[in-house]
Image: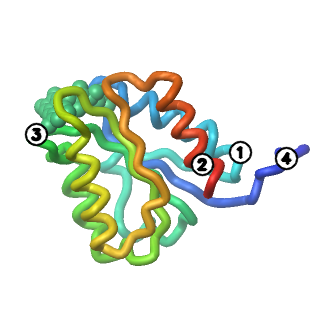
Amino acid sequence: MKQSEDFIDMKTAIVYYSGTGNTKMMTDVLEKELAKKGEVSVFTAPEFSADMLQSYDVIAFGCPAMGAEELEQDEFEPMFASLENNLGGKRIILFGSYAWADGEWMRTWRKRCEDDGAVVLADITSFEAPDDAVNEALTEAVSKI
Ligand SMILES: Cc1cc2nc3c(=O)[nH]c(=O)nc-3n(C[C@H](O)[C@H](O)[C@H](O)COP(=O)(O)O)c2cc1C
């Protein structure tokens, strides 16, 4: 099979939570773009655990703003917290949707990841459902990895 020029045989994963589908729409765009780089696996938050981190070159984590500028508390936050000792040097992309505030949850989340030693390649936020500009930002983030 002929592969596109930017196919670099990476193993990537997307790990996400989405309550009403907005972050899922971002996931779908990322999945399509990451597939151009190699093999992409998509997991909901409860399906992912720390022992899986080492299997992927890049991992995209997606979670909307919930609570008061927090990650979703029932599924995503416990999973993410369980990874935190193992994120050092890990190349990650963060993404998610919000609707009430100004994206503060993402700034907090990014800092948390950087404090854990992760290499945050991009953070992409979408006000409610992703529009063309968000889809472009997702595409560009993948093109740079
Ligand atoms: C319980 C709950 C808490 C939320 N908290 C915030 C918040 O703190 N800040 C914000 O900007 N949006 C907040 N939102 C809005 C969601 O982030 C927004 O609706 C988003 O598009 C949901 O993404 P999803 O469709 O992937 O679930 C909240 C929504 C719910 C249901």
Q: Secondary structure at mark 1?
A: loop
* Residue 48: x %, y % from top left: 37, 56
Q: Secondary structure at mark 2?
A: helix
Can the viewer see residue 19 in this picture?
no
Question: Which residue corresponds to the image point at 9% horizontal and 41% vertical from the top-left?
Answer: 68
Question: Which residue corresponds to the image point at 40% horizontal and 50% vertical from the top-left?
Answer: 94
Q: Quadrant of residue 2?
A: top right
Q: Secondary structure at mark 4?
A: loop
Q: Secondary structure at mark 3?
A: loop
Question: Which comes sooner in the sequence, label 3 or label 2?
Answer: 3
Of tags 1 and 2, which is closer to the observer?
2
Question: Identity of the amino acid at label 1?
Answer: Lys
Q: Disc 2 vs disc 4: Cβ atoms closer than 8 Å? A: no
Q: CA distance from mark 3 to mark 2?
A: 29 Å
Residue marked by disc 3: 67
Q: CA distance from mark 3 to mark 1?
A: 35 Å
Q: Disc 1 vs disc 2: Cβ atoms closer than 8 Å? A: yes
Residue marked by disc 4: 3
Question: Which comes sooner in the sequence, label 3 or label 4?
Answer: 4
Question: Identity of the amino acid at label 3?
Answer: Gly
Residue marked by disc 2: 142
Q: Quadrant of residue 89?
A: bottom left
On-image quarter of the C terminus: bottom right
Residue marked by disc 1: 36
Q: Residues within 10 Å of mark 4 (few under 14, many from 20)?
A: few
Question: Which residue corresponds to the image point at 21% horizontal and 45% vertical from the top-left?
Answer: 104
Q: Nearer the viewer, residue 43 or 97?
A: 97
